[in-house]
Structures are given as C-alpha cells and as structure tokens.
Image (tube, coloured by chain):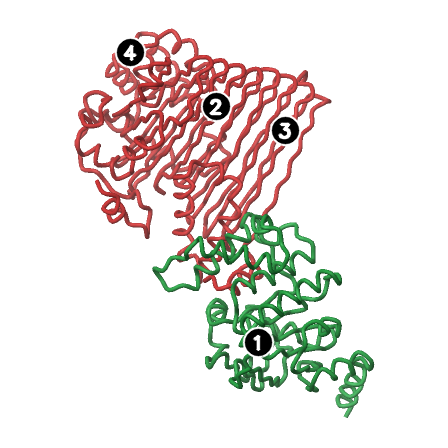
Amino acid sequence: MSDETILTIENLQANVAAEELGILKALDLQVRKGEVHAIMGPNGSGKSTLAKVLMGHPGYRPTGGRVLFAGRDLLAMEPHDRARAGLFLAFQYPVEVPGVSIANFLRTSMQSRLKEGDELDLFDFQDLLLDRMKLLEMEPSFAERSVNDGFSGGEKKRNEILQMAVLKPKLALMDETDSGLDIDALKVVTSGVNTLRREDPDMAIVLITHYQRVLDYITPDVVHVMVDGRIVRSGGPEVALWLEEEGYASWREDEEQAAAI
Amino acid sequence: MPENELVEELDLDQYKYDFRTVDKPVFRTEPGLSEDVVRAISAHKAEPEWMLEFRLKAYRLYLRKPMPTWGADLSDLENVLDKIYYYVRPQDRMKNNWEDVPDNIKNTFDKLGIPQAEQKVLAGVGAQYESEMVYHSLKKEWDEQGVIFDSIEDGLKNHPDIFRKYFASVIPPADNKFAALNSAVWSGGSFVYVPPGVHLDTPLQAYFRVNQERMGQFERTLIIIDEGAQAHYIEGCTAPVYSTESFHSGVIEIVVAKDARFRYTTIQNWSNNMYNLVTQRALVNERATMEWLDGNLGSKATMKYPSCYLVGEGAHGSILSIAYAGDGQHQDTGGKVVHAAPHTTSSIVSKSISKGTGRASYRGLCKVYEGSTSARSNVECDALLINETARSDTYPYIEIDEQSANVGHEATVSKIGDEQLFYLMSRGMSEEEAMALIVRGFIEPIAKQLPLEYAVELNRLIEMEMEGSVG
C-alpha cells in the first residue's frame, strides 16, 4: 500500500444549489491510495451529499474549502472530467436509460475516455466486459438489457459494481451500495469489490453506509462518523461496532445542547 | 468517386445536403398556378385525354377546398403557393442508364450516394430531380419475374390497364386540399407492381431531390403488391437551403392484395425552408400486412399521417413514426388506422424529439367500424423534450363502433433531466455525448427497424443536432 494521497478534502462546505441551507459544514477527509474509508451516519447527515458534491452533481453548490483529487482541483472540473481522471460514483439510486444497453453504455463511457481520434478496440472491450460479468456472477445476456430499465433494486446495485469493475477507477465512492441487497447479493457484490482491490491495490474506496453489515465483507481502514455535515469521529473498525451499539443519539444530543447554548 | 472524397465534400457541421447544383431546366412553367399550367404539364407528358380531365377536375376541387386550420401553421402558405414553380423539367427524358444522366444531375446524386447504394443492396433505384424522374432501373432478375418499377409517367404509358384500375382509387382528389392539388399537377414518382407470389428480398429505393429555389414538387406514387407478394420500398428526400420557402406535396397510394406483405420506409430530411404536406395511404386486404416506417427529420412544417385501411379479414397494419423537430420546425405527424373488417389488427408507435423552439405533434386516428369484430389496435406515443423551450402535443382520435374491439392508447412525455445527464457524465461522457446517447436510446425501438445506412445516418444526424444544444 502506497502512502500517496489520492483525495484530500479541506474544510468543504456545500449547499443545495437553490438554497442557502448548508449541508456540508467544514468537512475534512484524507484518503490514501489503496485505503478503504467507511462513512457512517444517520439519515440527513450529508453522507450522500458528500458523494454527489465530489462527483459534481449540478444540484449542489460548493461554497467553501477545497478538494484535491490525484493532485488536481476537483471542484473546478466538470463531472465527466472527474470521471476521466479516475473518480467513480456507485449511485444510491441509479438512473434508467431506456433503449441503451449496458454494453453500449459502457462502450460509450470507455470511448469517451480515450484521446480524440482513438478508437476503442471492440474485441478487447467485449472480452473485458464478459470477464467482469463473470467476476460478478452475471449472465452475459445482462449486458444486452437497457441500463436500469425495469431492474430490481439488487440488479441496479450490481450494475453499478459492474460499471466500476469495467471502468477501473482510482477512487470509488460507493453510496449505500449495500442497501436493498439481500445477503447473497451482498456477498457477490463485496467479493467482486475485493477482487478489484486485489487486482489494483492502489484503488481506494469511500464506502457510504448506514449499516455495519457491509463492513464484515469489505474491511475498512478507517471509519468516520458523520453527523450534520461534519465528520465527528474517525477511527478503526471498532468505531463501526461501537456505533452499532450506541447509535447516533449521543451526537444528536450534543448538537442540540450546542444549539441551545 | 472514392469514399473519402465524398465525405470531405459534405460539411457535417450543418445540414449536409445543402449544396446547389447550377443548371438550366429544359422547360418550366411560369411561377404560380393556373389552368394553363395544369394543361401545360399534361401536354408536356403527352397524356391521354382522361388524365387531363382528371387533372382539371382536381384543380377546380383544389380551388374550392379551404386551407386546413389545424396542424402546422399554414398562414403564409398561400403566399408561397403563388410564387413557386409547379413544373420543372430537368432533362429531355428519363434514363435507364446512369451514364446517360446529365453530368450536373449525376453529380448531385453521386454526392448523395445513390449509385453506391444501388450497387450494394438494392433491387432497384429511382431518382427524381425537380419534377421528373431522371433515372429508374431495376435489377434484371426482378424484371424477369415480372416486377415493374418505373416512373409514374411510364406506368401510365406502358401499363394503362393496371394504372387506370388503381390510380386515385385509394386517395381520391377530394380527400383533402393537397391531395386535390397533387392530383392536378402531379409529376414524377414511382409506379410499382409486384406480381403474385414474388418476394423481393432487397428494397426498391426512390430518391427525391429538389434543387432549384421556390420549387414545388408533386410526386405521385402508385404501388400494387399482388397476392402473396412481398416487397420493401424506401423513399429519401433532400433539398438545398434557400431563404425562400419551397413546397413538397406527394400522394402515395398503395394496394396490398391478400396474403401480401409490404413495407414503405420514408426518411424525409428536407431543408428547413420546405413545406411538406403528404398524403400516404394503403389499402390492406385479407391477411395482408402493411408497415409504414415514417421518419420526419427535416422540413419547416410537415403534415403527414400514413394510413392503413384494413379492408380484408385478418389484415394487419403497423405504423412506426419518428419525428425530430429542431429550431423553427413543426412536425405534425402520426398515423391513421381504419378497421373495416373482422379480426384486423394494428399498431401505431410514434416517437418524437423536440429541441430548441421545435414542436412535434402526434396526431393519430384509430377508427373501428361496426362489424369489425375482434379488431385490436394499440397506439403508443412517446415524446422527448431536449430543453425547456421545446414543445410536444398529442392529438389522439379514437372512434369505435364495434363492441368487441380492443383498443389501447398510451402516451408519455419525458424530458432529459439533470439526474439522467449527471449519471452518464459521471461515467465520463461529455454533456453532448450523454444527450446523444439518451436520444439514441429513445429512438432505438424504431432505429433498429431501419435499413443499416439509414440507422447510421439517423445516429449521425442526432449527434450533429446535439452539438451546440448544451449551454
């Protein structure tokens, strides 16, 4: 594992684009290559917002702080440039793209990353896609289905991981990938992710989750607890276990007291 | 001409058929329409007396019928109709050998890729330039099996019995104002006859080009697919861009005899100064199948509703319609299915895309006459809006006089949303690439039915149109 930092977030603040309401408040985070960071927190704490802001969702507006990704000023980049630089977001709610097959979708994604004038080798791509589908225990016919169109919740999540496996990011943000998966699907998905990590030990992961359960399968290096737009505690896997027992109530009370003062 | 040279000549950043050919027609009527113009057209074609009578009667009908007050905005059309040329004869007579076509016309079609297409995958090719078919050819094997693929004028001359039996039988001049106009001044178009049992395994293609300014093109096509026969006819249309309006009004009549199967594909990519008002109708007999595949991409205003009259028991009609309305364009398109026999089935699938100030309207009729027992029809129309200013409307008319009929209608309107774009961009696609992919996905159910070169063309057009749609 290298010591090199892939992601540095300093004092990040962000609003919902149309409102003044702050969702992220002075957030700091550092992720090194190859690390797995879990971010846990209650509903509305800003976990998913963080993922969207990092990917460049137009519905959110960063209002302060800075983010360096692979040495570049991430917030100044368009979403597709962030993707091309090696950032990936596994969506909590993947979007349907009717009429576009998964194979076509991924081929277009791969092609868009090439230099202007370069053509993707379609045979190489086909081999890669089949190989990745095998890794995730998917039938080859899955690639011919329209992206997320009529998919079950579990199929959508697996499709996200398939895309991650094909696009091979430097840093993958996984936004509640575990929710909506039954235990068998969770095992397949997490084992696929672990294989990807073995293939590329430099790949870093920021895992956003409600539940400790997924961390039984993907072992985090660092666990952060996020409450009200801030990281309030960071530590090893023991933090997750502790949270499971205590819940988020104690921070809420702290916040309420702070607000009262 | 080598292919790379061909590509270089076409400017892909804009409407790529915008090139003008400098030429001098051998004859044209004075601008505007009068009885003299109608007589001149008939005289130039050395027509039998009955046809002149037919034209004159239709002309009087045309004068009496009011302009439609629905559909596209035609308020300026009368003005346009006063100024256009109704008949322009580009060469002395039609050729059956490509080499004999005059150079300037040949070059025009070379640029459009017509001879290449013919050599590759077509059973026959026709090309119309201004008011006349300048070229028609049919592969020998089909000729030997009795297939007729000719200009409409030669159809009248050489096959008067079949011609007179069917001409204006499917679309009489009184059908609508523009059918009357076409009946008065028709010129050019194809005459197709496929004998019983003959299966054409590759398509016939006709290409329509309007070259000069202020032109009116009135092609008339008559197609008879005899019992148990099968065929596919493809029509493509382009014109250069002028600041003045041009006018295209075709009448396409089709008879599909019992157990026969026919598909008619149109890819209309007229320049954006063209009014395009077309009447297309098929009479579908017992157990026969008629399929319209109607692509409307160009023109200023199009009103076109391909129709299937299902008159024989078990007849099937299908209309796949795709419309693209960019800035300043109004596509008022859709389809009509009329059930007039038991166990007839039909489906209409319409997809429209509007962008900028473009407007796409779906207008459709499903009519089931009493006695058409167990008729089934399904209509599905989906509209995609690229941005806030684009517009889409749906005008479905359903008239059912038969209790046992089963008719379904479904309509959706969707907008390319931020979430969808963001999802695709998060995978590395630029906003334009993402939009083009979403649009391609939207039209995929229809695009996959198109002959390959048209599917490729459609994809390229969409990519081109998406450029500059961002921001």
**Callout 4: chain:** B
Q: Nearer the viewer, mark 3 or mark 1?
A: 1
Q: Is residue B357 above or below residue B220?
A: below
| Visual hue assigned to chain A | green
Q: Which chain is red?
A: B
Read off the residue under disc 3: B377
Q: Position of residue A73 (x, y in %)?
A: 47, 80
Q: Nearer the viewer, residue B468 or B285?
A: B285
Identify the amino acid type marked 1. Ala
Read off the residue under disc 2: B262
Instruction: Please tell me whether mark 4 sits on a helix, a strand or a loop.
Output: loop
**Callout 2: chain:** B
Instruction: Please tell me whether mark 2 sits on a helix, a strand or a loop.
Output: strand
Give the CA separation, mark 4 to mark 1. Answer: 81 Å
Left or right of residue B62, residue A83 in this image: right
Q: Which mark is residue A204?
A: 1
Q: Are marks 3 and 4 on the same chain?
A: yes
View extreme (right): residue: A245
Give the CA separation, mark 3 to mark 1. Answer: 55 Å
Q: Nearer the viewer, residue B150 or B208?
A: B150
Give the CA separation, mark 4 to mark 2. Answer: 30 Å
